[in-house]
Image: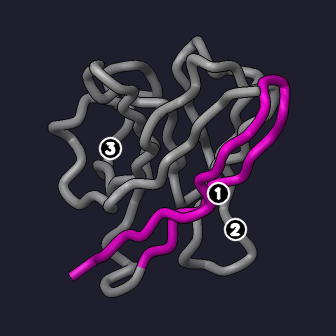
Amino acid sequence: QVQLVESGGDLVQPGGSLTLSCTASGGLAAIYAIGWFRQAPGKEREGVGLFRKLDGTTFYRESVRGRFTITGGNAKNTIILQMRDVVPEDTAVYYCAKGPAILKLDMSDLREELYDIWGQGTQVTVAS
């Protein structure tokens, strides 16, 4: 059974950078894609971006495109979310989740119902 654990959440100043990690264990062969999501206080959870393990292809929601980058980590079981030029609106609990095998690489891929295993989340706060 795949388990996912996020780490790296912290307090960061506007304009700063932060790196989050998603570490997977158990049944790694069953992971085709990892999605990153976030939930801000009082708001619904939204998809941030995704990473296709096979070839490293990524897709991002427009509000983070050019600022956030998802890559495979040095360890095969780690996916990294690099955040730069953060703004207060990036404040949220960030989650990684195991995604589907087939991707369209558009916003439809970031629907929560396509993701079946979730981590517990890590808090990111952007404030001066």
Q: Residue furthest front?
A: 128
Give the amino acid type for the residue marked by disc 1 in the picture.
Ile
The residues colored magenta run 1-24
Marks 2/1: CA–CA distance: 6 Å
Q: Secondary structure at mark 2?
A: loop
User: What residue appears at the point 81 percent right and 25 percent down from the top-left corner?
Assistant: 85
| In magenta stretch: residue 2 | yes
In this rendering, position of residue 90 left or right of residue 17:
left
The residue carrying mark 1 is: 80
Dividing the picture into quarters, in which one does residue 28 lie? bottom left
Task: Give whichever of discs 3 and 2 has the lower sequence position.
Answer: 2
The residue carrying mark 2 is: 73
**How far across and how far down the image is residue 48, in percent?**
49, 30
Q: Quadrant of the C terminus?
A: top right
Q: Secondary structure at mark 1?
A: strand
Crowd tier of the residue under label 2, counting other residues whose Cα lies within 10 Å: few below 14, some 14–19, many 20 or above: some
Between 8 and 115, the one nearer to me in the picture: 8
The residue carrying mark 3 is: 102
Up-down relation of residue 55 to residue 82 (above or below)? below
Up-down relation of residue 72 to residue 61 (above or below)? below
Circle 2/circle 1 CB separation < 8 Å? yes
User: What residue appears at the point 58 percent right and 71 percent down from the top-left corner?
Assistant: 78
Q: Secondary structure at mark 3?
A: loop
Marks 1/3: CA–CA distance: 21 Å
**How far across and how far down the image is residue 35, in percent?**
43, 45
Between 78 and 108, the one nearer to me in the picture: 78
User: What residue appears at the point 59 percent right and 53 percent down from the top-left corner?
Assistant: 9
